[in-house]
Amino acid sequence: MKALDELTFDNRFARLGDALSTHVLPEPIAEPCLVVASPAAMALLDLDPAVAETPVFAELFSGHKLWAEAEPRAMVYSGHQFGVYNPQLGDGRGLLLGEVYNEAGEHWDLHLKGAGQTPYSRMGDGRAVLRSSIREFLASEALQALGIPTTRALCVIGSSTPVWREKQERAAMLLRLSPSHVRFGHFEYFYYTKRPEQQKALGEHVLAMHFPECLEQPEPYLAMFREIVERNAELIAKWQAYGFCHGVMNTDNMSILGITFDFGPFAFLDDFDAHFICNHSDDQGRYSFSNQVPIGQWNLSALAQALTPFISVEALRETLGLYFPLYQAHYLDLMRRRLGLTTGEDDDQTLVENLLQLMQNAGVDYSLFFRRLGDHAPELAVTRLRDDFVDIKGFDAWAERYCARAARDGDNDQARRRMRMHAVNPLYILRNYLAQKAIDAAESGDYAEVRRLHAVLSDPFTEQPGMERYAERPPEWGKHLEISCSS
Ligand code: AMP
Ligand code: MG
């Protein structure tokens, strides 16, 4: 265990120079106080969870104090936003404070979000509000607990600094951890500004730091692109299998590591709805739940375009072709597990599709359905779930096929089936209304609910005594909350 002043820094990205990032100091927020910290994320830096309660912790992560070895930098990037190229983005309100090594030799970027204005702030104030910081914190740590690759959140620090959005709010800062903050948009920036040397410096950095095994391949850049395609196919399969809607899949919000990155108006599905749009400024539904799959490929093509100086168009095309089959294989594998199946049959894809269609028609709760399906043996489970459906005949036909399929699967021991299914079907997910309740309390200065919700979501597969209300379907008011995109 380390004290806060014992972190080991090695700021590799800063050493790439001013073409890739700019030195900027964080602008502190007033009266910093700890809202919530993640002991699991603190462990990644070998930090004792108790240090979160010390005043210096809040000072460090609110811009009042800085380690001597930190080198805060705002990164420059660009990207496609809603399909349109935006030539100049960059860290407008977040800073890479520095890079830290833990005792296991792992490397973590410390990124302070809401740290004030930078040369890339455009018209923005450089701030993040408390509500969006809490949402990112909860989502990062909830996704991690579900086994979905994501950036991590160390803490949220609140303040009395006023910020204007639709109304006056309070500024907060979130400390994000990630092995890298390089986005698809980083490669796009140097490609479209025609700076091959800087692009090469970036490419070599990313290869050496994050894809060293690709350096042993005859074509390292191609091997890296292939790896990025594979990771994204797997990531998006996990989003779809667990009902996570990212909301702003712009290429500047896509990590080259294939992890969930840059949370905005995200949502986990309550009722299953393939057409769900969680982002209220997404009028066309470009980033609707089911569109995330083709958009994943679209984004990879945008990255491919930016990599044409390194890789032949033919090889890029061929590699892009791997995305969809890989996605489908991962997705089907996850859905089989969610259904308690341990083997594969040709008709499984149809079994899944038919179920989702029935759920869509009836507005069935996506997470609870799978959880309850594992509670009892297949025949009893489907009898109990039947009333949730509108097309009862349709459901009965599905249920009959499912029970027969489960019987053929081999392992019919219900105790084992239940354990197997409950280990992949969460009881607790970050429903919008749960986040909203915690945010409402936090905005009036009470952080107990944020902390409790974070603790519940840290162990989503295990039934926790006394926490029944976190496993319920949302009340009517909580079903169609408008999540503001301004954050
Ligand atoms: P986001 O929608 O958070 O992914 O941000 C898109 C771009 O806008 C990034 O370049 C951000 O740094 C920038 N940005 C978002 N909010 C602010 C803000 N309040 N102040 C300055 N820049 C911002
Ligand atoms: Mg962003």
Image (cartoon, grey):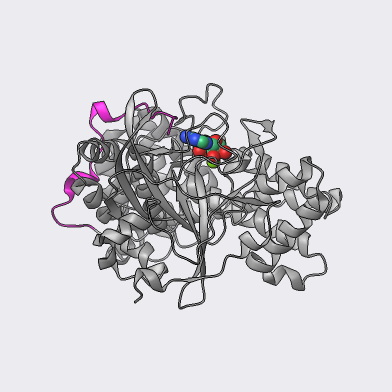
For the point 37% across and 41% down, the residue is 366
| Location of residue 425 with respect to 267 vertically, above or below | below
Q: Position of residue 54 (x, y in %)?
A: 25, 62
For the point 68% across and 45% down, the residue is 300
For the point 38% across and 66% down, the residue is 411
What predominant SS class does the magenta segment belong to? loop
| Location of residue 182 with respect to 351 vertically, above or below | below
Residue 60 falls in image quadrant: bottom left
In the rendered structure, the answer to whether residue 408 lies left or right of residue 447 reads: right
Which segment is the magenta one?
Answer: 463-487
Q: Position of residue 391 (x, y in %)?
A: 36, 28
Q: Which quarter of the figure is the N terminus placed in?
A: bottom left
Residue 284 falls in image quadrant: top right
Report the front residue among 303 and 337: 303
Taking the magenta stretch, the answer to whether it contains residue 475 is yes
In the rendered structure, the answer to whether residue 112 lies left or right of residue 393 reads: right
Q: Position of residue 469 (x, y in %)?
A: 18, 44
Report the front residue among 401 and 55: 55
Q: Position of residue 436 (x, y in %)?
A: 28, 36
In the rendered structure, the answer to whether residue 396 lies left or right of residue 221 reads: left
Report the front residue among 191 and 238: 191
